[in-house]
């Protein structure tokens, strides 16, 4: 069965923190999934908050504007392959 792709839009420290907690909880439940974090701008986020998010989300894009095409390409690839690991 294909794994769902959970996409997190990360606009500020609160969203990053909340997303980290959600991902940790899903991992505790042993639910298979693939996380994707898309930062509005990673440089303005708190380093400690981002470091914790890094621990639970291996696939990330650091800036929505500058990575727009890479995000589209990544999502297109995942849709074509059916999210299979």
Image (spheres, rainbow, N blue to C red):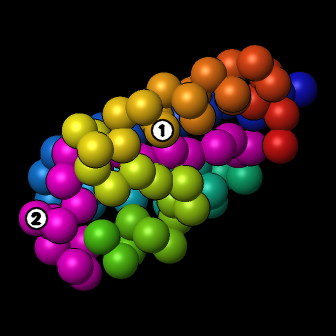
- Identify the residue at horizontal 69%, vertical 19% (top origin): 79
| Residue 31 figure quarter | top right
Q: In which quadrant of the rendered image does the N terminus lie? A: top right
Q: Is residue 51 left or right of residue 42?
A: right
Q: Is residue 83 left or right of residue 16?
A: right
| Residue 3 figure quarter | top right
Q: Report the front residue among 62 and 7.
A: 62
Q: How many marks?
A: 2
Label 1 sits on residue: 70
Cα separation, mark 2 vs mark 1, equals 21 Å
Judge whether residue 39 is colored magenta.
Answer: yes
Chain part drawn in magenta = 31-49
User: How far across and how far down the image is residue 35, in percent?
Assistant: 55, 46
Label 2 sits on residue: 44
Q: Is residue 20 left or right of residue 23?
A: left
83 vs 67: above or below:
above
- Identify the residue at horizontal 15%, vertical 59% (top origin): 13
Mark 2 or 1, closer to the camera:
1
Secondary structure, mark 1, is helix
- Identify the residue at horizontal 42%, vertical 31% (top origin): 69
Tell which residue pokes out farthest to the right in this image: 1
Q: Is residue 81 left or right of residue 77?
A: right
């Amino acid at each position: 069965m294909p794994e769902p792709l959970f996409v997190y839009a990360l606009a500020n420290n609160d969203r990053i923190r909340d997303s980290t907690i959600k991902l940790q909880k899903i991992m505790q439940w042993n639910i298979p999934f693939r996380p994707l974090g898309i930062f509005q701008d990673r440089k303005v986020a708190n380093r400690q908050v981002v470091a914790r998010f890094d621990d639970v989300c291996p696939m990330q894009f650091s800036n929505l504007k500058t990575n727009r095409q890479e995000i589209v390409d990544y999502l297109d690839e995942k849709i074509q392959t059916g999210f299979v690991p």
